[in-house]
Amino acid sequence: MKRYEVFTTIIFSIIIIVIFLCSEAFTMPAMTRSRIPPYIPSAERKKIENLFSNNAMARAKAAREIGDSGIQSISSIPFLIALLGDVELLNEMLDGEISTPGREAAKALANIGAPALNPVLEALGDTDAGVRVNAAFCLSLMRDPRAVNDLVSTLSDSEVDVRYYAVDALGKIKDPRALDPVVKLLKDESWRVRMNAAWALGEINDSRAVINLRSSLKDEHSAVRYYSADALGKIKDPSAVTDLIESLKDDNPDVRYFAAEALGKIKDPRAVDMLIRLLIDDKWKVRMSAAFALGLIKDPRAVEPLVEALKDENVTVRLYAAEALGDIKDPRAVFGLISTLDDNNIKIRVRAANALGKIKDPQAVDNLSILLKDTDPDVRYEALKALGRIRDSRCILALTHMLDDNSSKIRNHAAEILGTFNDPRAIEPLILTLKDSNVDIRYNVAESLYQLTGQHFGDDLDRWMKWWRSSKNAYLPQ
């Protein structure tokens, strides 16, 4: 399409939107095929015509196709607005979700973006509840701060789903102007709205909401309680600790899960004793969350219970226990972590090696050196990193063998860390590694050789070999 044709299309599109907004007719019957402007290209015109199909699926797919073109579909805005009230359920799922033509129209308007904002805001005031619901849903996808005032006004809508999507939109926009109105929705008659209000307050992340969220930890519906706990974890206000500790006793495991996670984020040691008790909770997700929280708090009281958690029947709990012990960095965890280096699960071996590297205790050197022969490259790499952190000369020969590993990532890291050991036994293996075809590995070899010898030969193998023949006895006396 030529430039002037594009310009003409946009101008006429804006005119029809203005006429549409100024007219009293605002619902689907007012928009007919006859109102499709003649200047619209045939391909787009066909999509708009399909919005009037007798088949709901065809209308929904037409809306989706229009939305896929984004802002180029600006001419379709009035027709999509008219479709917002179409709440006929589709007879089959669309991309794995239950939908309606109106919902697909809302998605299309969101994809079009800014030009559709004002028409959608107008739709929030429609007398048809279906239109208002999908308009609010559209705004939750748009996340445009200019919609805040209109969305706040919608929070008192008589329709539950309108309030639900309006508060969802405000949470995604994260504008503090919405704080007080959203706080009021923690008392809404619908648990779904209360739940979304708690979530939105966590996204807005303002400590002024804490006192109300603490009260919502006692809401009659579990979803409201666990979203309140999650929100308090995002806000990280210590004044919520006592209430969150109490929530660790909640009958609902999701509440215990989010309360434990929140306490970990707040990092208050008052929670440690109760979190330790949760390491034997009957739900694995709760045990996992407790281990995660204890790793964040880093209190040494948790070391022995976390070592016990390394034996948990659930692999995810063992993973988080190993990670927590690495974060706490207490040598008392070393032997427990060593015992997991032969775990059948690759991720456990990786996480345990990583933790031992963080603790940097020489007692782990022999076992980590053995792990360098693991069949999995990720395990070998993590063992190599851990030994590099511990930096004990007993492992130097094992590290030089990694210069021949079939993983270039491992060879590269071995070349890099050997220069930090200040051990002349690494010199000859490094020189021989200059035969490696990987230029990055040769570069790191040259850097490590410089650190060990002070010589500048780059990756010139011949010069290094000649120098080594004349200097070897000085570095490695018989």
Image (cartoon, rainbow, N blue to C red):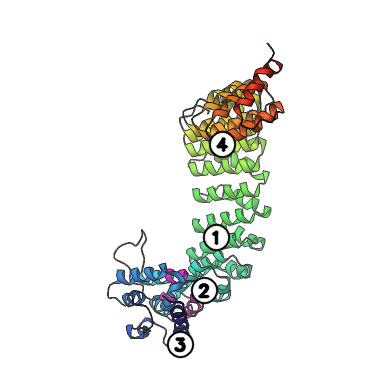
The C terminus sits in image quarter = top right
Q: Earlier in the sequence, mark 4 or mark 3?
A: 3
What residue does disc 1 label? 199
Q: Secondary structure at mark 3?
A: helix
Where, by quadrant of the figure, is residue 410 drawn?
top right
Please tell me which residue is depicted at 46% across the width and 77% down the height of the picture.
3
Q: Earlier in the sequence, mark 1 or mark 2?
A: 2
Q: Secondary structure at mark 1?
A: helix
Camera-near label (1 vs 4) is 4
Magenta residues, start to end: 107-131
Above/below status of 467 relative to 234: above
Q: Check disc 1 and give the amino acid type.
A: Trp
What residue does disc 4 label? 439
Q: Magenta-highlighted stretch: main secondary structure?
A: helix
Q: Are marks 3 and 2 in contact (CB under 8 Å)?
A: no
Q: Give residue 417's position: percent from left, percent from top.
A: 63, 31
What residue does disc 2 label? 114
User: Crowdedness of circle 1 by 10 Å Cα count: few (<14), some, many (20+)?
Assistant: many
